[in-house]
């Protein structure tokens, strides 16, 4: 899967979790950019992304990922 | 909403929870509003959000109180003003084995282990007793799931130093408390986690990362199971099965194969599976669930199949048997009418997806579980929690007989030209009296389950019933009715609030099983007699319209002879001035003095 293809699926997940069809994420997107993206919603996002891509983040990765770009790097390294 | 029924897609629910909530709230349903306090020993955020969805799907809109992280004990024992002001209708204590602080150490003496068990249990019991005294509402408590590892291997459950052994003993004490206390219910995560898969359920990732006591993907299963207890408390259990015959209760088509060639019994694996399924269905009778049949068969073929020597279910186990060629939607609707229950109280079980589709389309309130093959039928029905038991009453054991007796009464009616002669022939006897402790559970159950013959549809918890009985400003009445065909048990409940010499009927309900027997007249007579003893001169009746109680819109006027004194849209207020000389309206029931 290319990075663009990952973003197509990732945007779907973000739109579902936040119930907002207008969301589009990129490498520099952080939690500050989306209302409702707090630490508790973060859990849901992680679970939904893991389910979508059939992979699991490890504990260290979840705590250290700084932005969506870092998240995509991990996804790409796993699939 | 299909997405929120078993078997649901947990990931879908978690991902789409915002959209699902929006759609549920936009459905235009009228919701029962309840306040639920969640006292957590770990993260409760998504548990509440998903529980909210399942409750909305049951027609319950909950307002939640959520304790601060892991403050369950403090909130339970130290009466925070915020919780007091919240005034919960129901309290849920979300603890897990992560909240056990004093597990036995291998080096502990037997006495120390026993003390740790006692202390751990006592902390919980203190909470339950205090909450019960303070809030007088139902309490739901998780039991403990098994440990995620066994230090002592297979000895972990045997040796008192093992955590498994400790947890099993703790659960025993939890369960005993629930068995001996009303309005206290165990949420059985011991079974739920086993069912889900303990390794996945207790994945330490979710504890260490987010302090969730279960894996996030298990939250929908957890919340679904919890919602069953809550909807049962609010009277939303199903009441009856409508069962197909061919390939549902036996293998084969009785009209084509003949009874002797059906797969039912020990001869084949499939036959054995059908025996197991018939036993499962039959066991529901003793829980007070009514069994009925809708089958596309000649009646004699249907009855022939039911007389199979190896079949646990026999003709007499069923209340109504509709074996004909009518559409099943018509038969099912008729079953609801003849039993005097709502379509929403029925569970339709049929192996044929086309038949299931017709029912889903024509009778959308009927529950229609998806069943696939005989080896899966039991699970595919069981997991829906249609008949979540809170407490089994002796009325439940007798319910099937009561309904059968009703069918006999209807048959007897055919032979009487004069209706009141028929009523007298029933030799009815009633007891109408103030609430008694032995019936209070059943009385509370009735206030939550009765929808049609219910004038005000006011719901009461067991505590509220107990309070009403003790309240000197209120008159309480329950009525039991029996006749020559059988005992109907407690069938009517009324509560009058006395204010300025007027008795305001805040509750009047009756089971539809005893319609048109003049029981309501007997109750009115008792209310009038009681009012006279208290020097009350007027009785006021109130009708609050709901989607389900149109049948009693003019009850006070037409049946009891009250006068309408005001109207507010579809609601109405009625009055009867108690005459000096009151002649009893009831002439056909012998009411005990």
Image: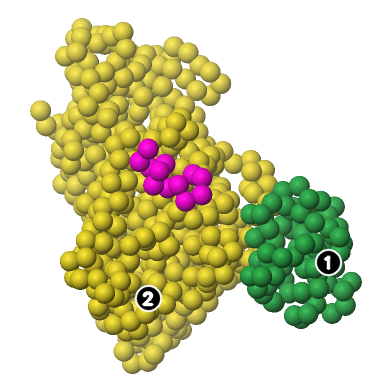
Q: Which mark is residue A69?
A: 1
Asked which secondary structure carries label 2, the reply is helix
- Stretch in magenta: B67-78
Q: The disc numbered 1 marks a residue on which chain?
A: A
Q: Quadrant of residue B455?
A: top left
Visible in this render: residue B365? no
Q: The disc numbered 2 marks a residue on which chain?
A: B
Q: Nearer the viewer, mark 2 or mark 1?
A: 1
**Are callouts 2 and 1 both on one chain?**
no
Residue that numbered label 2 is attached to: B277
Which residue reaches farthest bottom?
B267
Horizontal and vertical percent for residue B310? Answer: 28, 82
Residue B75 covered by magenta stretch: yes
Q: Quadrant of residue B584?
A: top left
The residue lying toward the viewer, choosing from B69 and A18, is: B69
The residue lying toward the viewer, choosing from B138 and B497, is: B138
* Marks 2 and 1, how far apart at CA: 54 Å
Residue B276 covered by magenta stretch: no
Note the chain letter of the yellow one.
Answer: B
Q: Colour of chain A?
A: green
**Is disc 2 surrounded by few (<14), some (14 to 19) or many (20+) residues within 10 Å?**
many
Q: Disc 2, disc 1: CB below 8 Å?
A: no
The residue lying toward the viewer, choosing from B385 and B480, is: B385
Residue B143 lies, with reference to residue B93, above or below; the image says: below
Q: Residue at the spot x=28%, y=63% of the render?
A: B170
Left or right position of B105 against B27: left
Horizontal and vertical percent for residue B438? Answer: 18, 42
Residue B473 lies, with reference to residue B67, above or below; the image says: above
């Amino acid at each position: 899967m290319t990075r663009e293809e990952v973003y197509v699926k990732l945007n779907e997940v973000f739109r579902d979790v936040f119930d907002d069809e207008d969301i589009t994420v990129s490498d520099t997107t952080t939690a500050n950019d989306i209302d409702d993206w707090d630490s508790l919603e973060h859990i849901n996002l992680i679970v939904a992304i893991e389910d979508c891509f059939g992979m699991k983040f490890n504990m260290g990765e979840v705590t250290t990922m700084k932005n969506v770009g870092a998240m995509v790097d991990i996804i790409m390294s796993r699939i | 909403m299909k997405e929120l029924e078993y078997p649901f897609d947990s990931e879908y629910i978690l991902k789409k929870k915002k959209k699902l909530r929006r759609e549920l709230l936009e459905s235009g349903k009228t919701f029962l509003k309840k306040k639920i306090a969640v006292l957590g020993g770990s993260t409760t955020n998504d548990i509440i959000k998903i529980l909210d969805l399942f409750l909305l799907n049951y027609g319950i809109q909950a307002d939640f109180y959520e304790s601060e992280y892991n403050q369950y004990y403090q909130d339970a024992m130290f009466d925070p003003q915020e919780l007091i002001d919240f005034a919960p209708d129901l309290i849920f204590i979300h603890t897990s084995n992560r909240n056990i602080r004093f597990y036995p150490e291998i080096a502990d003496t037997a006495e120390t282990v026993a003390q740790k068990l006692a202390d751990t249990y006592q902390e919980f019991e203190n909470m339950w007793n205090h909450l019960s005294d303070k809030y007088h509402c139902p309490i739901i408590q998780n039991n403990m799931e098994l440990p995620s590892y066994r230090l002592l291997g297979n000895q972990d459950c045997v040796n008192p130093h093992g955590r498994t052994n400790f947890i099993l003993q703790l659960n025993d004490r939890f369960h005993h408390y629930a068995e001996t206390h009303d309005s206290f219910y165990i949420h059985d995560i011991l079974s739920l986690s086993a069912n889900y898969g303990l390794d996945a359920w207790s994945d330490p990732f979710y504890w260490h990362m987010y302090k969730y006591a279960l894996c996030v993907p298990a939250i929908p299963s957890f919340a679904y199971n919890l919602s069953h207890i809550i909807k049962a408390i609010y009277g939303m259990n199903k009441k009856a099965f409508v069962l197909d015959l061919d390939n549902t209760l036996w293998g084969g088509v009785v009209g084509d194969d003949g009874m002797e060639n059906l797969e039912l019994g020990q001869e084949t694996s499939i036959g054995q599976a059908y025996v197991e399924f018939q036993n499962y269905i039959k066991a529901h009778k003793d829980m007070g669930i009514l069994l009925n049949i809708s089958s596309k068969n000649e009646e004699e073929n249907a009855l022939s199949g039911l007389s199979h020597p190896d079949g646990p279910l026999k003709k007499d186990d069923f209340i109504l048997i509709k074996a004909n060629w009518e559409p099943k939607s018509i038969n099912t609707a008729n079953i609801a009418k003849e039993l005097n229950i709502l379509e929403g109280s029925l569970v339709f079980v049929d192996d044929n997806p086309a038949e299931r589709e017709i029912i889903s389309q024509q009778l959308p309130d009927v529950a229609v579980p998806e069943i696939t093959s005989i080896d899966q039928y039991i699970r595919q029905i069981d997991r829906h929690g249609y008949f979540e038991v809170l407490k089994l009453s002796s009325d439940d054991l007798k319910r099937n007989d009561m309904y059968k007796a009703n069918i006999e009464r209807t048959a007897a009616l055919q032979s009487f030209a004069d209706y009141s002669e028929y009523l007298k022939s029933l030799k009815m006897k009633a007891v109408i009296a103030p609430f008694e402790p032995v019936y209070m559970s059943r009385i509370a159950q009735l206030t939550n389950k009765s929808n049609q013959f219910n004038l005000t549809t006011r719901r009461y918890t067991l505590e509220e019933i107990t309070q009403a009985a003790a309240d000197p400003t209120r008159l309480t009445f329950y009525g039991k009715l029996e006749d020559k065909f059988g005992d109907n048990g407690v069938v009517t409940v009324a509560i009058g609030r006395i204010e300025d010499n007027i008795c305001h009927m805040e509750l009047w309900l009756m089971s539809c099983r005893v319609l048109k027997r003049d029981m309501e007249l007997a109750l009115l007579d008792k209310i009038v007699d009681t009012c006279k003893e208290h020097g009350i001169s007027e009785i006021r009746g109130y009708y609050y319209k709901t989607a389900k109680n149109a049948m009693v819109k003019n009850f006070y006027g037409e049946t009891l002879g009250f006068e309408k004194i005001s109207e507010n849209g579809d609601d109405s207020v009625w009055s009867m001035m108690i005459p000096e000389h009151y002649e009893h309206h009831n002439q056909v029931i012998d009411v005990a003095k």
